[in-house]
């Protein structure tokens, strides 16, 4: 068991999860549980970087996202949920890593830049906002994972994490700058240089047919949506195609959904063939197929989710988080101690107590 290679990934709690999260990363996580030792991080500290005045909302969103994960098939018997604010090693490593990254390197991070634009943060964002990208390096490296399954938008962050890992190992652990990424641990490095693993659909278009699926743009199908809501949202997806006989573009948003959610490859091929020839097939027909496929995916999630609603559900989630915090800290503390030893900061071992 303990020889399974490790994974770490996570989400910033910002509301309910949607199909973009599923195809971008969540599906990967559920499947990888069989072969990897998985750590899934609830980045509740990061939620404060843009919503510091909303602690009650952040607490609610944190529990909601944990429920979405469990409903989607994250198995708390096999995988460890990591509640970021209860893992002190993450905050400590963030400080050390902040010294290994040039300030301007952080500020050039394209994911941060995009976020500043999308969230309209202008030049009034908190000091902690860009710091979260450094913190994310610590989230990851605290667990020394091999793989980080993420959506496409996170790849720039993982690249920065890889740079930090290498630089730490060169600076403090005697790893030669010529070492290949895969050789770092064998050469005595404290950290592996982890790789990003992007889901099968890096960027799912929303039901507006234009923008990336996102809660704030109002174009999302949530994992908790009912069959009726899914049908209605799919129905509103506009492709611009007018008749059932005009040749359709199978690269439009609707067909991204066909390929993402219709399971049977023969069915996908048939729909693509008929649509592209305009063989008496309307958008409505395709949408019905897609809605049915999405329903097949969501129905079991809805059922598992129902068991987690209400006060009893919150209690169950909090119980899991407390138990998993102990497991997560055991790993993160071991990493931190190794890092401090490498940095000549060994003033004796320590242990944390919870509860
Ligand atoms: N920044 C990620 C997001 O917004 C969440 C996150 C925080 C994360 N720490 C992480 C993802 C570490 C992967 C690994 O979705």
Image: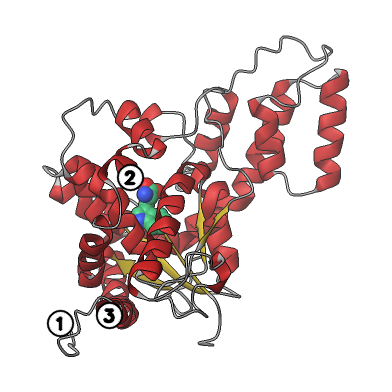
Crowd around label 2: few <14 · some 14–19 · many ≥20 (10 Å): some
Question: Between disc 2 and disc 1, whose residue precedes?
Answer: 2
Discs 3/1, front = 3
Q: Quadrant of residue 183?
A: bottom right
**Colour scheme of the rendered structure:** secondary structure
Disc 3 + disc 2, Cβ < 8 Å: no
Residue 212, horizontal then vertical, whole percent: 50, 31
The answer to whether 2 is drawn above or below residue 294 in the figure is below
**For this rendering, which residue is in front, 344 or 294?**
344
- Helix, strand or loop at label 1? It is loop
Ligand 1: does it lie within 8 Å of the C-beta at label 2? no
For label 3, being within 8 Å of ligand 1 is answered: no
Residue at x 39%, y 72% (from the top left corner): 143
Residue in the foreground of this view, choosing between 247 and 176: 176
Quarter of the image where the N terminus is located: bottom right
In the rendered image, residue 148, in percent from the top left (x then y), is placed at: 49, 60
Residue farthest toward the bottom in the current orientation of the protein: 348
Q: Which residue does the image show at 63% across and 38% down from the upper left? A: 291
Q: Is residue 198 left or right of residue 122?
A: right
Label placed on residue 15: 2
* Spatial CA span between label 3 and label 2: 30 Å
Question: Whole-Å distance between the Cαs marked 3 and 1?
Answer: 17 Å
Rendered image: mark on residue 333: 3
Q: Say which residue label 1 marks.
A: 355
Q: CA–CA distance between discs 2 and 1?
A: 28 Å
Q: Are marks 3 and 1 in contact (CB under 8 Å)?
A: no
Give the mark, 3 or 1, whose residue is nearer the N terminus.
Answer: 3
Q: Residue pushed farthest left?
A: 53
């Amino acid at each position: 068991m303990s020889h399974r290679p490790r994974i770490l990934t996570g989400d910033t709690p910002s509301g309910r999860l949607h199909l973009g999260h599923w195809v971008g990363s969540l599906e990967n996580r559920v499947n990888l549980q069989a072969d990897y030792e998985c750590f899934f991080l609830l980045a509740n500290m990061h939620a404060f970087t843009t919503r510091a005045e909303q602690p009650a909302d952040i607490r609610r969103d944190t529990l909601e996202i944990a429920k979405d994960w469990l409903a989607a098939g994250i198995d708390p018997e096999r995988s460890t949920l990591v509640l970021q604010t209860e893992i002190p090693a993450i905050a400590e490593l963030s400080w050390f890593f902040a010294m290994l990254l040039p300030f301007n390197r952080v500020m050039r991070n394209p994911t941060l830049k995009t976020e500043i634009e999308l969230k309209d943060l202008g030049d009034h964002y908190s000091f902690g906002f860009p710091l979260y990208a450094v913190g994310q390096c610590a989230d990851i490296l605290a667990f020394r994972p091999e793989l980080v399954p993420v959506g496409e938008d996170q790849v720039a962050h993982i690249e920065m994490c890889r740079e930090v890992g290498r630089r730490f190992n060169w600076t403090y652990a005697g790893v030669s700058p010529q070492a290949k990424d895969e050789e770092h641990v064998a050469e005595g490095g404290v950290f592996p240089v982890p790789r990003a693993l992007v889901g099968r659909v890096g960027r799912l278009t929303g039901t507006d047919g234009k923008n990336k699926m996102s809660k704030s743009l109002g174009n999302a199908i949530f994992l908790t949506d009912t069959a009726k809501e899914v049908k209605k949202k799919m129905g509103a997806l506009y492709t611009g195609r007018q008749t059932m006989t005009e040749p359709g573009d199978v690269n439009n948003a609707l067909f991204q959904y066909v390929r993402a959610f219709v399971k049977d490859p023969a069915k996908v091929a048939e729909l693509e063939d008929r649509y592209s020839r305009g063989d008496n097939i309307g958008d409505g027909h395709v949408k019905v197929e897609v809605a049915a496929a999405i329903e097949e995916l969501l129905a079991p999630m809805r059922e598992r989710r129902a068991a987690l609603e209400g006060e009893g559900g919150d209690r169950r989630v909090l119980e899991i988080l407390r138990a998993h915090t102990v497991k997560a800290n055991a790993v993160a503390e071991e990493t931190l101690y190794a890092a401090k030893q490498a940095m000549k900061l060994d003033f004796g071992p320590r242990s944390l107590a919870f509860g």
